[in-house]
Amino acid sequence: MVSAYSNHLNSVWPPKDANYFLVSFVERLTISYQVCSVSTTSIGHQTKDVVVSLTVLMCLIEQRAQRSQRYVVKVWMARNSMFMNDGKTQYRPIVPKSADAIVDKSVIRVGMATIMASLCVQCLGVCIDMHLDMQKQVSQTISACPFYLHNLNHISRFLPRPTKERIVNAIITPRLDYYNALLYGTSAVNIARLQRIHNASARLIMRSPRSDSTTPLLRELHWLPIVCRVDVKLLVFTYKAMHNDAPVYLCELVCPYKPTRTLRSANNNMLQVKRTRTKAGDCSFAIAAASLWNNLPTVIKTCDNLTSFKRLLKTHFCRIAY
């Protein structure tokens, strides 16, 4: 039961209208309340009005909305065989480096748990830090690869080349390609760390010494460099978004280029590139996808199916890389 008192709302509504509005609004929210009669003295007369404090009412509405949202999320997760543990919830605000000291002291409440800001949060195996530089994710990706390469090196001389390719493509390559679209715009240091693992895998398959260049090996294996693999993943997402095969939140970010006047580029199947003022804005999907897509040849952009698009896309990037 909630007992609330305040001055009457004559300045906004007549007393009867204000009381009727507030009480009916509380009843629609199914909040238990207690109506109290308050005697207030005005200039020249005395009135008795039943009122509800607007401040308390807004707090009740906000609390009920939060409880309803948590309840809906928990019900949905329970129906899908999942459990929401409030105590294990993590959050990490994405902020510039100048705001690190402020964010480190911020807290939020989920249910009965108080959650402090974490240095890194993990979602579906991907580590997301506060600056989105993906350094933690790269370290986690390459942490286990040397172990597998070391063990495979002991038996590599007994295995034929096709078998070694299958083993590397089953163990090493999925780790390098997992969520690699998030690496677009990351530092060259992170790309170089992943490329070293990629080069070591190529040397293992071809049984080449460390002093030899890996460019001929990658060309012979038809392997793209890490930078090109990131671009290919983004372009595949772009192709799916343009043909409505991607999630809605990606399809909404892809806008076809429609010039206001007649131009030769109007029929080139291009995308609109929005203007940004920051480097982080250039790394967003809406900007990166449009920039990469507009640089493709028209033959690739007009492919009828995804299989042909991937085949031509790999051939195009192989010519660029090698």
Image: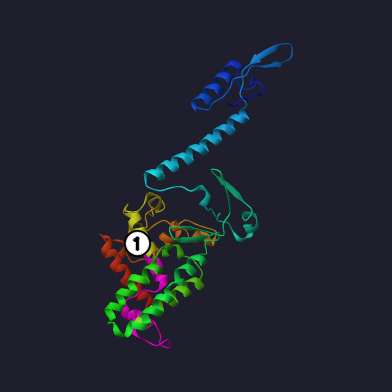
Secondary structure state at the residue bearing disc 1: helix
Q: Taking the image as drawn, is residue 260 in sight? A: no
Residue density around tag 1, few if under 14, some if 14–19, many if 20 or more, within 10 Å: some
Q: Which residues are magenta?
A: 205-232
Question: What residue is shown at x 51% (from left), y 66% (from top)?
Answer: 136
The reply to whether the magenta stretch includes residue 229 is: yes
Name the residue at the top extreme. 45
Q: Which residue is mark 1?
A: 236
**Dot 1 amino acid type:** Val
Drawn side of residue 105 relative to residue 311, left or right: right
In this view of the protein, which residue sits in the foreground, 34 or 106? 34
Indicate the position of residue 32 as horizontal and vertical percent values: 54, 26
Q: Quadrant of the N terminus?
A: top right
**Residue 295 sits in which quadrant?**
bottom left
In this view of the protein, which residue sits in the foreground, 264 or 113? 113
Question: What residue is shown at x 51% (from left), y 47% (from top)?
Answer: 86
Question: What residue is shown at x 52% (from left), y 61% (from top)?
Answer: 132
Indicate the position of residue 198 as horizontal and vertical percent values: 40, 76
The image shows residue 37, relative to residue 185, as above or below, that is: above
Indicate the position of residue 102 as horizontal and vertical percent values: 64, 54
The reply to whether the magenta stretch includes residue 246 is: no
Drawn side of residue 140 relative to residue 40, left or right: left
In this view of the protein, which residue sits in the foreground, 38 or 183? 38
How many marks do you count on the picture?
1
**Residue 156 sits in which quadrant?**
bottom left
